[in-house]
Image (spheres, rainbow, N blue to C red):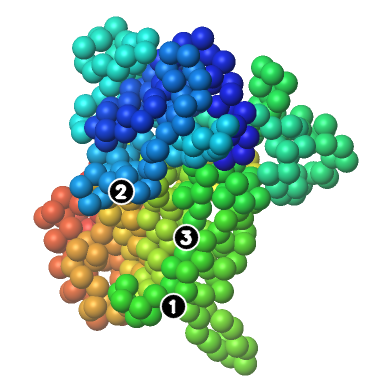
Amino acid sequence: MENLHILVERLREMPNETEWLEFKHNNYEPDAIGEAISALANSAALVERDCAYMVWGINDKTHEIVGTNLNQYSKLNGNQEIESWLRTMLTKNAEFEFHSVKMNDMDVVVLIIYRAVNQTVMFKKTDYIRIGSYTTKLSENPTKQAQLWDKIRSARFEEQIAKNDLQANEALNLLDSSVYFDLKQEQTPASSEAILHYMVEEGVIVCQDNGLYSVTNMGAILLAKSLSSFPRLARKAVRVVLYEGNNRMNMLKEHTEGKGYIAGFERLIEYITAIIPTREIIHGARRAQKTAYPLLAIREMIANALIHQDFSIAGTGPVVEMFSNRVEITNPGIPLVDINRIIDNPPKSRNEKLASLMRRLGLCEELGTGWDKITISCELEQLPAPKINVYEQNTKVTLFSEAPFTNISLEDRLWACYLHSCIKYIEGDQLTNSSLRTRFGLENSSAGNISRLIKEAVRTKMIKPLDPTTAPRHMKYIPFWA
């Protein structure tokens, strides 16, 4: 970390330890550190500070530099390095960094602890808080507990600070502002002052009380020239992994898009497009290349993963995994809407400011029609339906390449049938045996197989007849919720 010695000197100038600052000499008992991280992270959120600090090598009474022999990387808890152990004991939203600096030829270790986001930070399933210079259980302080939750609920990831204490030119140099103006189809202003004005208006850069500037999380995650310049966000870069065959046994390629999501979006799509399998098709005398997956679907799925991820889950980001028969896109967080209503429900996002800027710059859909486009593009190419799997802390969307109807599992056929009924319904139409045969690319001779599939979809209450009294051959179907 830059200017670490300046940070330590400023902290030493504080008259006393506070809710967000604790000094230590050589006390590095692992449980005490874990409790302190929880307490300091929660206290920082309560007093609306971006960071709290725990500093070893400073006398807690006189604030003199006395040095420390703490080495956070070699100090073990059992057989595990203490930093690794702490991360397993703390909740996933705990973000902290150990740094070392020489002061007066003595070692000082600074633990930077970032404020709690989205929920309280817990250690061993208990959350703590600082009362003055003391650490105590949050549950024993109900008034502080209520105040803290009010602050956490009102805080937004996009508005938090990714990097602070920057000169104006330093802040601008971290960001690719030119892509912002390109996407707006406007000429980039000639002066830095004018560019800074736009960045401040968008909430990408904010002016601090001391006249310096900060880059917000939204500014960094969207416009960073390099996410590695923002250590807490570096793991949010999109990874693309290409495997040989249908499993993860042999990795062929791995690529990390190091730019911000807006700055690097087109480059990311180009890279993925280049490694998607293609085959040559002939129309009359003309040859053309056909990709294994609709590029529109790929684009929309990646945009959704970026926008709707849960940034409070630290240490992980969106991942695109490509196999010979499918593409899997995984992002941290679970959907805010029922996946069975993914097509017809109005869009919801846990990152509204980020989503709004990406929409205004044309990098994603505007009216919640992303899943309509994904589903329709797969139907037009008669591919298996895109699948959504929700896990404890992640969502995975899978796009399948072309497969014969007989090779598609019953579960996936039923899901395709259901999505087809949803698309038809929002278009003011209904699912029929004929429309579903067309969707799967089947001949009239397969009407019996499709009838059995429809019957099973009705039995499992995924679809229902529009009019149960209609003759079987003229029956039409709608989603269960219609």
Label 2 SS: strand
Residue at point 68%, 44% (across, down): 175
Amino acid type, callout 3 = Arg
Q: Which residue is mark 2?
A: 81
| Residue sitting at the far left | 459
Instruction: From the viewer's side, name the closer residue of 451 and 373.
Output: 373
Residue at point 20%, 31% (across, down): 125
Q: Quadrant of residue 366?
A: top right
Q: Residues within 10 Å of mark 1 (few under 14, many from 20)?
A: few
Query: What's the CA distance linking mark 1 and mark 3?
Result: 14 Å
| Residue sitting at the far right | 190
Q: Residues within 10 Å of mark 2 (few under 14, many from 20)?
A: some
Kindly check if marks 2 and 3 are in contact, taking CB atoms under 8 A apart as contact.
no
Q: Which residue is mark 1?
A: 252
* Of pointers 1 and 3, the one earlier in the residue sequence: 3
* Of pointers 1 and 2, the one earlier in the residue sequence: 2
Residue at point 15%, 68% (across, down): 452
Amino acid type, callout 2 = Glu
Measuring from the top left, give residue 294's x and y in whole percent: 48, 68
Picture disc at residue 45: none
Instruction: From the viewer's side, name the closer residue of 270 and 78.
Output: 78
- Quarter holding the N terminus? top right
